[in-house]
Amino acid sequence: MTVIAVMNQKGGSTKTTTCTGLGRALSLDGYNVALVDSDPQGSLLDWAAAHDDQPMQVYVIDRPALEREIPKLKEEIVIIDGTAKAADLALKTIKVADLILIPVQPSPLDVWATSDMVNMIKDHQDDQIAAGEPPVKVAFVVSRVIGNTKLSKKISETLTGYGFPVFKTRMVQRQDHPNSQTSGRTALDTRPGGLAAHELRALKNEVLAFLAL
Ligand SMILES: Nc1ncnc2c1ncn2[C@@H]1O[C@H](COP(=O)(O)OP(=O)(O)OP(=O)(O)O)[C@@H](O)[C@H]1O
Ligand SMILES: [Mg+2]
């Protein structure tokens, strides 16, 4: 089992959209995917409930229970929708992940807001290395990009300065994402030939390559 955690303490940073879109792209590739809402009041479950015949399993596991419950899942790839609430509990999610994806909007305020979480992840990596374990993989995904602005290039450079790679794939601001969520789907289902769907497949390919799957 491979566990991907999508995390950012900042609300509205596109965690849930990244989880659903990435999960669906992987499931369309034939992977058996589970999505996990780590916030009992989170929106992943609302999204899933809007579609009767949801192709992915969706579970709710509150963060204190993640370490106990995640190993019980049978799916090949588990994607955890991290929550912005209660930063002190973020370590519970970090601990169960093989890969942490951090979606960040291209604004300096959003970039600076990730620094506490970045430090928490680095401390965990240090603990893993000290224990002789491979450190968790981490990457940033720049999300809700509007135009190919100088600012978003600058943001990528600043993020690289945090010491984690920034994925080449950028998730552009596209209406296909919220439009598809209305019916509990993703852009891959509602407009598979569109650019939003194309970017989700590119993100999936980059994730698979990064994980060497
Ligand atoms: N690439 C995109 N283009 C346009 N809208 C987007 C895109 N990605 C996400 N959104 C929209 O932005 C809003 C915030 O996204 P989302 O709910 O995924 O963020 P989140 O990090 O899960 O938020 P929260 O911290 O509240 O859980 C949603 O309305 C979503 O539909
Ligand atoms: Mg969310």
Image (cartoon, grey):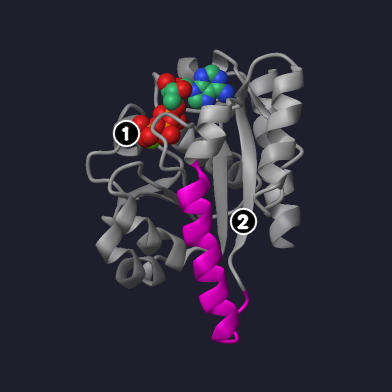
Disc 2 residue type (three-letter): Val
The C terminus - image quarter: bottom right
- In this view, the mark in front (2 or 1): 2
The residue located at (72%, 56%) in the rendering is 210
Disc 1 residue type (three-letter): Ser
The residue located at (54%, 86%) in the rendering is 131
Q: Where residue 133 appears, x then y in whole percent? A: 59, 81
The vertical placement of 65 against 164, above or below, is below
Residue corresponding to mark 2: 138
Would you say 198 lies left or right of 183 here? right
The residue located at (40%, 59%) in the rendering is 93
Secondary structure beneath label 2: strand
Which of the 4 image quadrants contains residue 159?
top right
- Front residue of 25 and 39: 39
Residue corresponding to mark 1: 43
Q: Is mark 1 within 8 Å of ligand 2?
A: yes
Tell me if residue 77 can be seen: no
The vertical placement of 101 against 18, above or below, is below
